[in-house]
Amino acid sequence: MSQKKLTHVERRLTEEERARHASIREAIVQELPPNPGSGQNPIASGIPARIRHAREAQGLTWYALAKLAGLADQATIRDIEHGNDVKVSDLENVAKALGLKLELVEQSVG
């Protein structure tokens, strides 16, 4: 029997694929409901929230975004989204991969 080698193709999901995945997730939750209080960890506001929103809007997983940003570990994306300390260079690479830019601005006093 011939064995086919599967290859991974990196591309963004189409709207049709996103809808199909959402319906599959919904069916699974109906069949196997999560335990109470076991939802996603809350995310911090500000930069972490912007990063997560941009990632989800583009249909990217932590793993896919880490690869796009040239990071070795997808946990760095999780750490960013949860407001944990990360290297500024990693944060810049993630923002760039999402089409965002980090910049420092003067804060008004008063």
Image (spheres, rainbow, N blue to C red):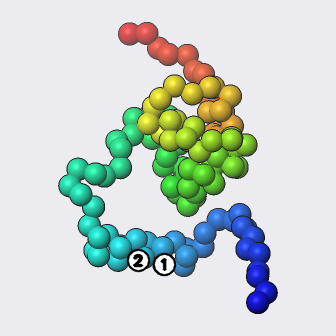
**Residue 4, position as x, y percentages in the image:** 76, 80
Q: Which residue is rendered at x = 73% and y = 43% of the image?
A: 70
Which residue is under mark 2? 23
Up-down relation of residue 106 to residue 97 (above or below): above
Q: For residue 86, which quarter of the picture?
A: top right
Which SS class for mark 1? helix
Which residue has dot 1 on it? 20
In percent of width and height, residue 97 lies at 68, 46
Q: Is residue 39 left or right of residue 84?
A: left
Which amino acid type corresponds to the residue marked 2 in the rendered image?
Answer: Ser
Against 27, is 74 above or below? Answer: above
Residue 43 visible in rendering: yes
Q: In this view, which residue lies farthest toward the left?
A: 36
The amino acid on which the numbered mark 1 sits, given as a three-letter code, is Arg
Task: Tell me how far mark 1 sits from mark 2, CA to CA.
Answer: 5 Å
Residue at point 50%, 41% (across, down): 78
Residue closer to the observer: 59 or 103: 59
- What is the tally of numbered marks visible in this picture? 2
What's the residue at 28%, 74% (across, down)?
30
Q: Position of residue 19 (x, y in %)?
A: 47, 75
Callout 2: few (<14), some (14-19), or many (20+) C-alpha neighbours within 10 Å? Answer: few
Dots 1, 2 in contact, CB < 8 A: yes
Q: Residues within 10 Å of mark 1 (few under 14, many from 20)?
A: few
